[in-house]
Image (cartoon, rainbow, N blue to C red):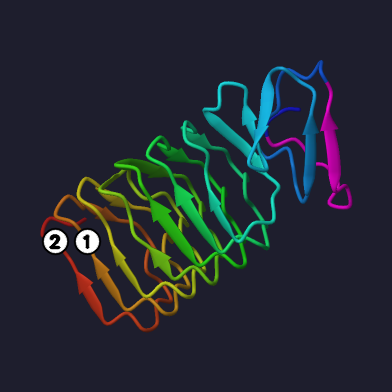
Amino acid sequence: LDDNQESFEPSLEELRIPSNVEYIGRAAFNGIRKIENDSPYFKIDKDALLSNDGTNLIYYFGKSKKYRIPSGVVTVWSNAFMGNQYIEEITIPSSVRTIESNAFEDCSQLRSVVFNSDYLFLGDSAFFECKKLSSFKMPKRMGNLSGRTFWGCQSLTEINIPEGVEIIGNASFWYCYSLKKIVLPSSIKTIEDDAFNHCDYLSELHLPEGLK
């Protein structure tokens, strides 16, 4: 399955990966709620399809309200949790370094994200339209915020962006209606177009010197 190929039909809920499959591209699955695996190139751990070495979380198909990403995962792939309607709290272990684009898009019940990692990079639209997300304590260090990272996260009330972040991408916090307070680090150099557009109740914004 190639990257960004048409996903399996939404009506398909169960899938068995045959033994001859060596490669699965990003965003290959959509709406599948049960996966069985016969391929030596992948494994299943805690209702998640992982690469065989455990470093890549390809797709989560579980129904747990609380979920901890398995230790050893380094990268959460694009669309890995997209559209999950069950998860309310997710814990990110210290091994995770990258959450790719759209990884948690439209997780309608997601309320809290807990980080145990010291560094993290969030891809474009990583938490797009997670409307109930209200608790998001960022790790100590992060890469630049990509575009639309928190677009439509209507329940976020406060964000404290850590030191080291230099760029807040286009429309990163668009439609975060409830956002009242944002603290920006001294490392911030650029806030791109529409970064805080439609943050209607934003009353406190700490801006460092030297912004572009």
Residue 124 is one of the magenta-drawn residues: no
**Rendered image quadrant of residue 130:** bottom right
User: Split into 4 quadrants, where in the image is the C terminus?
Assistant: bottom left
On screen, residue 82 above or below 35: below
Is residue 177 visible in the rendered structure shown here? yes
Which amino acid does the dot numbered 1 rest on? Leu
Label 1: few (<14), some or many (≥20) within 10 Å? Answer: some
On screen, residue 147 above or below 86: above
Residues 197 and 103: in front is 103
Which amino acid does the dot numbered 2 rest on? Pro
- Left or right: 180, with 32 as reference point: left
On screen, residue 32 above or below 18: below
Kindly identify which residue carries mark 2. Answer: 208
Q: Which residues are magenta?
A: 4-18
Is residue 7 visible in the rendered structure shown here? no
What secondary structure is found at the residue carrying circle 2?
loop
Which residue is pictured at 17% across the width and 50% down the height?
187
How far apart are the alpha carbons under marks 1 and 2? 7 Å
On screen, residue 53 above or below 123: above
- Left or right: 208, with 39 as reference point: left
Kindly identify which residue carries mark 1. Answer: 184
What secondary structure is found at the residue carrying circle 1?
loop
Q: Confirm or deny contact between disc 1 and disc 2 (CB under 8 A).
A: yes
Residue 7 is one of the magenta-drawn residues: yes
Q: Main secondary structure of the magenta part?
A: loop
Which residue is pictured at 51% across the width and 51% down the height?
126
Residue 86 percent across, percent down from the top left:
66, 62
- Left or right: 13, with 182 as reference point: right
